Image (spheres, grey):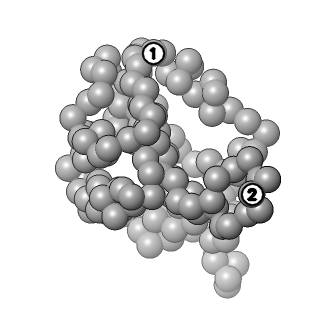
Amino acid sequence: MTASGAIITASATSDPDLFWALKGGGNNFGIVTKFTLAAYKAPKVSAGLAIHTEADVDKYITALADFANHHEEIDSGAGGIFVLLVIPGKPETQAVQQGVTVMVRTVQIGDVVNPAVFENFTSLPHVFSQYTVSSLAQYVEPLDSAYQAGR
């Protein structure tokens, strides 16, 4: 519903700006009363997790910008959770170390460990990495939490 009270249907071809905003804007662009979802068969997914240090932030931002700028060329079965975590200075007794940490959690439909679509990220130096092939249910299980709004 618009500010004037008109009920509209936003899609990629009808009101594309609103459609774009609703896909990533959280709850600030209107009330969605119906949506159509396309489902893809995904018996196996290739999942990855890598953690990088502050020294590689510039390379990470470049890789992320490249990934975002070429999204139309990227396989629709690929996606990720990309995190740049800044922890301000804390007292020496604090368990969490201050600084910047980068985390990349990737997923790609298929059974190829470490797929090429994420090469910009996997080629970065890392302090931890893990790449596996599993079912989609096994991949999302550890992501499920009480803090759903964070996703």
At 79% from the left and 39% from the top, the residue drawn is 146
Residues packed near mark 1 inside 10 Å, few (<14), some (14 to 19) or many (20 plus): some
Q: Which mark is residue 102?
A: none
At 77% from the left and 62% from the top, the residue drawn is 91
| Residue 138 against residue 32 in the figure, above or below | above
- Between disc 2 and disc 1, the foreground one is 2
| Cα–Cα gap, marks 2 and 1 | 40 Å
Quadrant position of residue 113: top left
Image position of 83 (left or right of 68): right
Is 97 or 144 nearer to us in this picture? 97
Is there any visible trace of residue 41 in the rendered image?
Answer: no
Q: Position of residue 11 (x, y in %)?
A: 45, 60
Secondary structure under the numbered disc 2 in the rendered image = loop
To which residue does mark 1 refer? 134
Is there any visible trace of residue 84 in the rendered image?
Answer: yes
Determine contact: label 2, label 1, CB under 8 Å: no
At 35% from the left and 38% from the top, the residue drawn is 78
Q: Position of residue 150 (x, y in %)?
A: 67, 51
To which residue does mark 2 refer? 92
| Residue 102 against residue 62 in the figure, above or below | above
Residues packed near mark 2 inside 10 Å, few (<14), some (14 to 19) or many (20 plus): few
Q: How many numbered discs, if any?
A: 2
